[in-house]
Amino acid sequence: KAGVTQTPRYLIKTRGQQVTLSCSPISGHRSVSWYQQTPGQGLQFLFEYFSETQRNKGNFPGRFSGRQFSNSRSEMNVSTLELGDSALYLCASSVRTGMIHEQYFGPGTRLTVT
Amino acid sequence: AQSVTQLDSQVPVFEEAPVELRCNYSSSVSVYLFWYVQYPNQGLQLLLKYLSGSTLVKGINGFEAEFNKSQTSFHLRKPSVHISDTAEYFCAVSYEGAQKLVFGQGTRLTINP
């Protein structure tokens, strides 16, 4: 099976612009989560989608949003970009195995805001 | 609130030496514990997980971890490291039914020849 794919891998944007990142989960996985990774804050949970519905959301401002399509692909959008939004954005798709959702991470999209 | 503390931000060791990366967690409910590895310019790869049962968990690449409920710890060990183990290692926790992972700040493992 192909792994989780994220596009684009690298992105440079200017402060004030908006950006959309895409994630294609592993075939058969219906759940997708997004995380932000920065040197200062580490790995932080953004949100989780299952069957096109947001089930959980982290502590991020409303400028961060996401959605999931019927084929389980997901996108996240960041509007009015700030310098502090520069980060590696990781997507994880998961399937429930027993007691947990085992998460498989993509390579990430590295966003640089100038 | 759940939190994870990785006590060492950097750990340098010599090749073929043993290593232990420390992780402590806090939670008021049953937890599930994970160690992930991140190589440069890559995503996270699952090394091992503790769900229940035996407190000693074996993972990939020769790593193992021991769950200690009384000390709320989940330390990662490898008896003999290789240059290829150079990476950043993350401890994470989740609780039953939840998808969200809470990560520690990471430990950068550097292997010197």
Image (cartoon, rainbow, N blue to C red):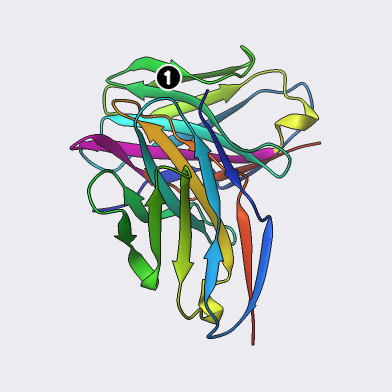
Q: How many marks?
A: 1
> Which chain letter matches label 1?
A
Q: Residue at x 62, y 56 (%)?
A: B107
Is residue A73 in view? Answer: no
Is residue A43 in view? Answer: yes
List x then y, in percent, for residue A102.
30, 42
Between B92 and A33, the one nearer to me in the picture: B92
Residue that carries the numbered disc 1 in the rendered image: A67
Q: Is residue A86 left or right of residue A71?
A: right
Between A28 and A33, the one nearer to me in the picture: A33
The amino acid type found where label 1 is placed reads Arg
Between A3 and B81, the one nearer to me in the picture: B81
* Image quadrant where residue B31 sits: top left
Q: Residue furthest top?
A: A62
Q: Is residue B47 left or right of residue B37?
A: left
* Image quadrant where residue B58 sits: bottom left
List x then y, in percent, for residue A33.
42, 31
Q: Secondary structure beneath disc 1?
A: strand
Q: Residue furthest front?
A: B70
List x then y, in percent, for residue A79.
66, 18
Q: Residue at x 18, y 37 (%)?
A: A98
Q: Which residues are magenta?
A: A87-103
- Give the answer, above or below, for where A105 lies relative to A72: below
In which quadrant will I find the C terminus of chain A?
top right
Q: Residue at x 58, y 71 (%)?
A: B86
**In the rendered structure, does residue A50 fall within the stretch colored magenta?**
no
Q: Is the magenta region chiefly helix, strand or loop?
A: strand
